Image (cartoon, grey):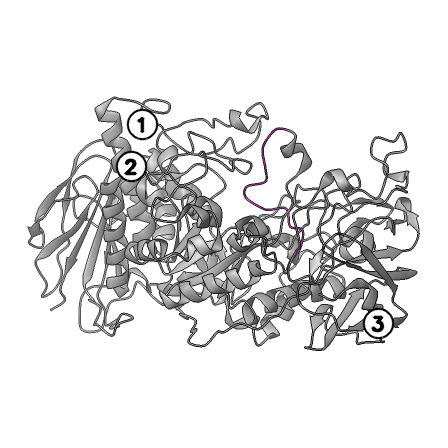
Amino acid sequence: MIERASLPVPRPGHDYPLGATWDGRGVNFAIYSANATAVDLCLFDADGREQRYALREQTAHVWHGYVPGLGPGQRYGWRVHGPYEPDRGLRFNPHVVLLDPYAKALASLEQFEAGVFAYQTGAEAEDHALREEDARGVPLGVVIDPSFDWSGDRAPDIPLHETILYETHVRGLTMRHPDVPQELRGTYAGLAHPAMLQYLKELGITSVELMPVHAHLDDPFLLDKGLSNYWGYSTLNFFAPELRYSAAFRRGDAEGAVREFKEMVKALHAAGLEVILDVVYNHTAEGNHMGPTLSFKGIDNPTYYRLVPDHPRFYFDYTGTGNTLNVRHQQTLQLIMDSLRYWVTEMHVDGFRFDLASTLARGLHEVDQLSGFFTIIHQDPVLSQVKLIAEPWDVGEGGYQVGNFPVKWAEWNGVYRDSIRAFWKGEGGLASDLGYRLTGSSDLYQGDGRKPSASINFITAHDGFTLRDMVSYNDKHNEANQEGNQDGHNDNRSWNCGAEGPTDDPDIKALRSRQQRNLLATLLLSQGTPMLLGGDEFGQTQQGNNNAYCQDNEISWYDWGQVDESLLRFTRRLIALRRKHPGLHRLKFFSGRPIRGTDISDLMWFRHDGEPMSDEDWQAPHTQSLAMFLAGNGLKDRDADGRPLHDDHLVLMLSASPEDLEFTLPEVQGGGPWELLLDTADDAAEETRACGEKTRLPGRAVKLYRMRPA
């Protein structure tokens, strides 16, 4: 960064690309605002002294200029002029220094005490009262050097049907890990540490799905309580990585956060692991009409937000956060696409999970499968080739859209979650629904040309109970959030197995252990793409908190000192079984037709007595058990190391009944015997049975058998 006194007058520069772009000789600055009357580029030195330049050039609503001599490390912001008329949706105030929407790195975290509001807080006129004091509390952008040595980096490129997702949090995963150095815990570098890479590889998952890593805001109402926005679903900027997760930032190198993130991705790729980002393009941290002015509001409020047509002072809120991005506007849509492409091309991530994705598909109000958002992504040569996962709902009317997203998209299957939880809770009458969920939810995805892998199967996620808590609590216990336990879901479909919370009762503890295994086995032995909540594999608890969004502490951080080693070994074994047997992650839906030359179908269902499931059995309220036969019908395949995968006949037995049952092993033409692969009631169980022979399935248990085809 050069001295302020020697800065030359800006040249006209170019209107593309947006943001700050260093070319080796200087920096081009460009910002979009269709409603501004003037735009000032503000350059800051290390002491916070400001040099302003009024940009004179404007092309297609893009204000631009080029400053020779500037380079990486230069801090900058914007002051944007125009009417401050909230009743018209206009909120310009040049007293507020604004963050560039295209900033690739941030200089600091937000500083509320230095001013982040465009109006006088506490005034009787509310947001109508213009602030006339200087406000510099918004983080400045930092010009970066985008170069990085990606030599040797290769995307794992794992097919979706072979993918096993691991949802986790950069900070929470490593904050208490004893083998990660203290200075790296909670950071991108900590996630890339050899100890973490070894753990993830040994677990067997293929893809790490990171909760939001875009720069976010810590909400003032949380800070006032001594809490913070741990989950990060309060986006401040869609390009810059979050500084709170950067070891480089801790050392005083803000620009280094970008390099550190790239190093993390490269390390995960070298370990054969994909990086999927949970992204929040439906709203920002600027909130409603009483929220702060950080970036978009002060640059061009009507462009970036969905305003109420007859009352543009106010915002449509399909997200429950105060605002909704205006994806119908071409510039906002371009912002999102530029951000997505940046994270793929420059940061090398392998895909995205879109938070509240129904919001992105809304036309005027309704969710539209043919919206511009989907159309542009499907036509994009970069984005159409990465993993695209939707959270297919929002809080607006008609926002629950499970099964309705277009081809190329996978979806968090909330129907799967609810059905499997209810079944293992002991609710009857779910056999028919269970059949659909175990086989890839063809009722939701087959009709539009998608495959079983479009169903992202999950039982737990960051939002809700952990797996251990789901079998330990009937009710949420969110008192630590300081909201009177009124926040979080009430419909958890959980069962505490006989006692609320911790207990010393050995029978209850044994049942909880088995129920965790039952749920994990169901998840990993179902068709579709499984997503494991990080920590569930070893019994992580949040003490019954089912909405730990504000708990950046021991409630959320993984407790590596309390690992249930037997559960961890069981989960590793389950994942290995799934990866070994192609019949557990089929490319296509089952046909139900006989396999040529045999009297067996690729999928058959049996009662515990060996008789085929009847229509009455499927609908009966008392049905709590079934057996699913999967034929080894020629799905020959090899693993990543070229070793042949076993193409066995499989039979999966599930019983949520509290009573022990005698299950009859299916008769298979030319086959036998059946070899036990898994028993959730006994990790060490070994058993071989002949066709037609019976086996005891204890109450509330799962067994998986295999048979080599003749």
**Residue 538 falls in image quadrant:** top left
Percent across and percent down for residue 39 are 87, 61
**Disc 2 marks which residue?**
515
Q: With respect to residue 126, does 592 lie above or below?
A: below
**Residue nearest the observer in this picture, 269 or 331:** 269
Q: Is residue 3 magenta?
A: no
Percent across and percent down for residue 463 are 50, 41
Q: Specify few, some or many for label 3: CA neighbours under 10 Å numbering under 14, 14-19, or 20 or more.
A: few
Per the picture, the main secondary structure of the magenta-coloured stretch is loop
Residue mark closest to the camera, 1 vs 3: 3
**Residue nearest the observer in this picture, 538 or 686:** 538
Label 1 residue SS: loop
**Disc 3 marks which residue?**
8
Is residue 443 found left or right of 708 in the rendered image?
Answer: right
As shown in the figure, which amino acid type bears the numbered disc 1? Cys
**Residue 110 falls in image quadrant:** top right
Mark 2 or mark 3: which comes first in sequence?
3
Percent across and percent down for residue 532 are 38, 49
Q: With respect to residue 291, does 189 lie above or below?
A: below
Q: Is residue 355 visible?
A: no
What is the span of residues highlighted in magenta in the rendered image? 225-237
Q: Specify few, some or many for label 2: CA neighbours under 10 Å numbering under 14, 14-19, or 20 or more.
A: many
Label 3 residue SS: loop
Please tell me which residue is depicted at 67% across the width and 33% down the height of the picture: 221
Please tell me which residue is depicted at 27% across the width and 45% down the height of the picture: 568
Label 2 residue SS: helix
Q: Is residue 231 magenta?
A: yes
Q: Which label sits on residue 497? A: 1
Q: Quadrant of the C terminus?
A: bottom left
Mark 1 or mark 3: which comes first in sequence?
3
